[in-house]
Image (spheres, helix red, strand yellow):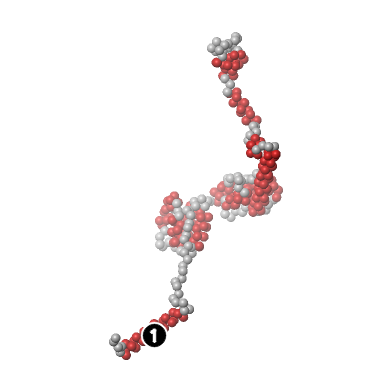
């Protein structure tokens, strides 16, 4: 082993002391636990549905919620995500606009949003006519129908008397009379009252069916057969009776229908199958 001269020893000692000092400083910074690990970066994938042509405003509402969850703030990144979710027909419709976006565009996402809402959003008149022509109650609860009608209300309009009248017009007559007498002052109050009436009405119908079944069992009959026999659909209306009578008349033989009084008894009864004839008789083959 070669002996170090004085200069080499001084150089070595100086560098060793510097390395030891740096290591001690690192230990003090990390609290003695070694080098601090790199900070973990949370990443949430953006999952957007395909663009809703029927309701662009609500689609962008959901898209922006996804962007906030993924901590995406760059306008260009949002723009790229939206473009990937445009159906072919929509992309073709805004083709010229998309091709104009370049690196110099200040806020491509806001520009694209405005373009799509303008192109596919409903005008206030379209919303108004959709509200007027909205379907009736059907098997929905009244509050559900109210929410769907409120979604069609043009922006800035309030659900006041005319709106509530449209809502009442889509309810059964019995419910409509009760709600009109209650004189509700808001759409929310009217919907809540209508739900109470709807639930009570449904419970009354179920109770009536149960009572019929219990009565049928008491008579020793099958409830389902009894209800089927007594159902309104099984009771023949006057119109159906007339229809059946007309069918029976059309089923008569032409000879019996046209010349019944001029034929003999055998031809009236057997028609062409009669083997004998009693005069007088107007049968064509006589």
Q: Residue at x 62, y 15 (%)?
A: 261
Rendered location of residue 281, percent (x, y): 59, 11
239 to 165, vertically: above or below: above
Q: Which residue occupies the extreme top position in the image?
A: 279
Q: Which residue is mark 1?
A: 17
Instruction: From the viewer's perspective, tell me whether residue 33 is left or right of residue 139.
Output: left
**Could you tell me which quadrant the N terminus lies in?**
bottom left
10 Å crowding of disc 1: few (<14), some (14-19), many (20+): few
Nearer the observer, 223 or 57? 223
Instruction: From the viewer's perspective, tell me whether residue 26 is left or right of residue 171.
Output: left
Instruction: From the viewer's perspective, tell me whether residue 78 is left or right of residue 202.
Output: left
179 to 26, vertically: above or below: above
Nearer the observer, 229 or 39? 229
**Residue 193 visible in the snapshot:** yes
> On the image, which quarter does residue 172 sit in?
top right
> On the image, which quarter does residue 229 sit in?
top right
**Could you tell me which quadrant the C terminus lies in?**
top right
Q: Residue at x 60, y 45 (%)?
A: 138
**Residue 160 visible in the snapshot:** no
Nearer the observer, 179 or 108? 179
114 to 4, vertically: above or below: above
> On the image, which quarter does residue 174 sit in?
top right
Q: Which residue occupies the extreme front position in the image?
A: 220
Rendered location of residue 83, percent (x, y): 44, 56
Nearer the observer, 118 or 65? 65
Q: Residue at x 66, y 48 (%)?
A: 199
Rendered location of residue 137, percent (x, y): 61, 46
Rendered location of residue 60, percent (x, y): 50, 57
């Amino acid at each position: 082993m070669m002996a170090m001269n004085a200069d080499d020893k001084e150089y070595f000692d100086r560098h060793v002391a510097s390395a030891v000092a740096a290591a001690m400083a690192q230990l003090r910074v990390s609290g003695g636990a070694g080098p601090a690990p790199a900070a973990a970066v949370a990443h949430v994938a953006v999952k957007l549905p395909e663009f809703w042509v029927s309701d662009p405003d609500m689609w962008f509402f959901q898209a922006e919620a996804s962007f906030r969850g993924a901590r995406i703030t760059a306008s260009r990144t949002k723009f790229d995500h939206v473009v990937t979710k445009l159906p072919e027909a929509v992309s073709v419709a805004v083709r010229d606009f998309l091709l104009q976006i370049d690196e110099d565009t200040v806020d491509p996402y806001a520009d694209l949003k405005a373009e799509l809402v303008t192109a596919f959003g409903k005008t206030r008149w379209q919303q108004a006519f959709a509200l007027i022509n909205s379907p009736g109650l059907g098997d929905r609860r009244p509050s559900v129908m109210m929410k769907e009608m409120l979604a069609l209300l043009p922006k800035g309009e309030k659900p006041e008397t005319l709106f509530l009248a449209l809502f009442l017009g889509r309810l059964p007559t019995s419910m409509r009379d009760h709600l009109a007498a209650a004189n509700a002052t808001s759409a929310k109050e009217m919907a809540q009252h209508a739900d109470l009436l709807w639930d009570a009405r449904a419970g009354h119908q179920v109770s009536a069916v149960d009572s019929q079944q219990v009565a049928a069992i008491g008579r020793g009959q099958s409830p389902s057969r009894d209800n089927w026999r007594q159902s309104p659909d099984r009771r023949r209306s006057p119109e159906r009776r007339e229809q059946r009578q007309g069918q029976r008349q059309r089923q008569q033989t032409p000879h019996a229908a046209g010349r019944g009084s001029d034929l003999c008894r055998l031809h009236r009864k057997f028609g062409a199958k009669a083997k004998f004839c009693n005069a007088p008789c107007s049968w064509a083959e006589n």
